[in-house]
Image: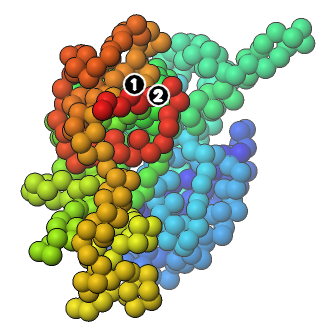
Amino acid sequence: MYAIIDLETTGGQPTQDRITEIAIYIHDGEKIVDEYATLLNPGRAIPPFITQLTGITNDMVSDAPKFHEVARKVVEMTEGCVFVAHNVRFDYSFLKKEFADLGYNYSRKTLCTVRLSRSLIPGQPSYSLGKLCQNIGIPLQGRHRAAGDAHATALLFGKLLKITNESEDLPHGADTSHTLARVDALAPAGRRPDGTKAPKPKRVAAMQEAIRTALLPPLVSPELVASLPQATGVYYFHNEAGEVIYVGKSINIYKRIQQHFAIDVKSRKSLEFKNSIADITWELTGSELVALLYESHLIKQMKPAYNRAQRRSVFPAGIYLRVDEQGYKRLAYGRADARNAEIPIIALGNQYKAQGFLYHKVAKYNLCQKLCGLYKTTGPCFDYQVHRCLGACVGQEPPESYNLRVDEAIDSISYEHESFVVIGPGRTELEKSIVLVENGRYRGFAFVDETFSARKLADFRDVIQPYADNKDIQQIIRLHLRTKRKGEKVKVFG
């Protein structure tokens, strides 16, 4: 079953605008079997330009039901149906947002008749609903009203179903033979009586393919997505001018990029981002650690438009070490400001996480809450009052013994002054990756032949490609070292 849906709204942003009209036509694959349409009170004024476009006025919706009054009807009508619309991302985004505001997760498989039309009726001068219907002989009454547009979309959908089931001729001499051949090739195979594989009916295959590709950015082809590697590396999104607008990394590039293309109704920016993607390229690394390090380097070097949050610091907070006038070593949490030359012992995602991390270390190593900035007081800390602090906050415990425990806490999270290499998988089975840290500073990485061997640190230093060290890089390495990766080993030097 298919639910063909059209909405009219107060504007184009799901996070800010609301629905003013909804129409639903239920199609069983052969014909329309049910329908529903109503105006909705959006709870806000309809802009004049929207009224001019749709004809829907504030007076018309003043006594109309609000969305929460029809939400149950929408859920019940579309239950078990594929959500079909002309430019499905627009309508689906708005409905998801309306339901999210009610605390309900509305989720349906989606199908876009714009994308399906481009595939099955190639060569049309325009794929807007009005012009497409005019060019292929579909009546459209009530343009820019939900019922009129939804009914026309339902008729268009029926036409597309028929094309996938029969090789019919369309007006203007449209040739669908190559499309039907592609649909046959994409169809999952069943079994004939003799046990050999047989393709599914063309209509089923085409619908499955349309559902799978409905959420792709309009400038990205299904063939490009299908060619993405299911391997570890970094990937680049390019706009139509070829500029890199986003850099990412994953242990499975194909799956991660599919996640990017899932519907996100949180902001207009996310829709703008998807619509800007025109090409995808990638570089394999084999090693997850190398992918993380290389991604961080590329973002800071290239400054892609949609990686803004990571340009300065992926981890904007951290734990710092200072020594006070009495000689006590003090751990403290705070912002990891790019203008601050002080490098944190460990960088974290935000100050709340940094504070929680420090609380954990204070409890584990019996440190003083006051000296760690977790208990603001002019007197003793709370732990001293309940006999958990040994009195560094009031001078009862000498710095020498207190600082030993601080050093233990630091050693548990820092690789300062250490020299080691992380040897992991390479881009192929015939090579391996090497990440070098020397005297607590990241030096770079390299890919070497599987026969490569080294006995001393200088041997590794000679082959690596140097890269800059920074707070984010140090945090990436620290976090990575906490978990043991398959096929990876760490070699430590004196």
Q: Residues within 10 Å of mark 2 (few under 14, many from 20)?
A: some
Q: Is residue 309 above or below residue 170?
A: below
From the image, which quarter does the N terminus lie in?
top right
Mark 2 residue type:
Glu
Q: Position of residue 422 (x, y in %)?
A: 37, 29
Determine which residue is flagged by label 2: 488
Question: Between residues 170 and 258, which one lies in front from this camera angle?
Answer: 258
Give the x, y percent position of residue 457.
26, 23
**What secondary structure is found at the residue carrying circle 2?**
loop
Q: Are marks 2 and 1 in contact (CB under 8 Å)?
A: yes
Residue 80, percent from left and from top? 71, 51
- In the picture, the quarter occupied by the C terminus is top left
Q: Earlier in the sequence, mark 2 or mark 1?
A: 1
Q: Is residue 154 left or right of residue 424?
A: right
Q: Secondary structure at mark 1?
A: strand
Q: Tell me how far mark 2 sits from mark 1, CA to CA.
A: 6 Å
Number of labels in the image equals 2
Mark 1 Cα shell of 10 Å, populated few (<14), some (14-19), many (≥20): many
- What residue do we see at 64% from left, 16% from top? 184
Tell me the quarter of the picture where residue 291 sits: top left
Residue to which mark 1 is pinned: 423
Q: Residue furthest right?
A: 193
What residue appears at the point 39 percent right and 59 percent down from the top-left corner?
266
Q: Nearer the viewer, residue 249 or 176?
A: 249
Give the image location of residue 117, x and y in percent: 49, 31
Asked whether, in this view, residue 374 is left or right of residue 230, the answer is: left
Q: Amino acid at mark 1?
A: Ile
Q: Is residue 181 above or below residue 284?
A: above
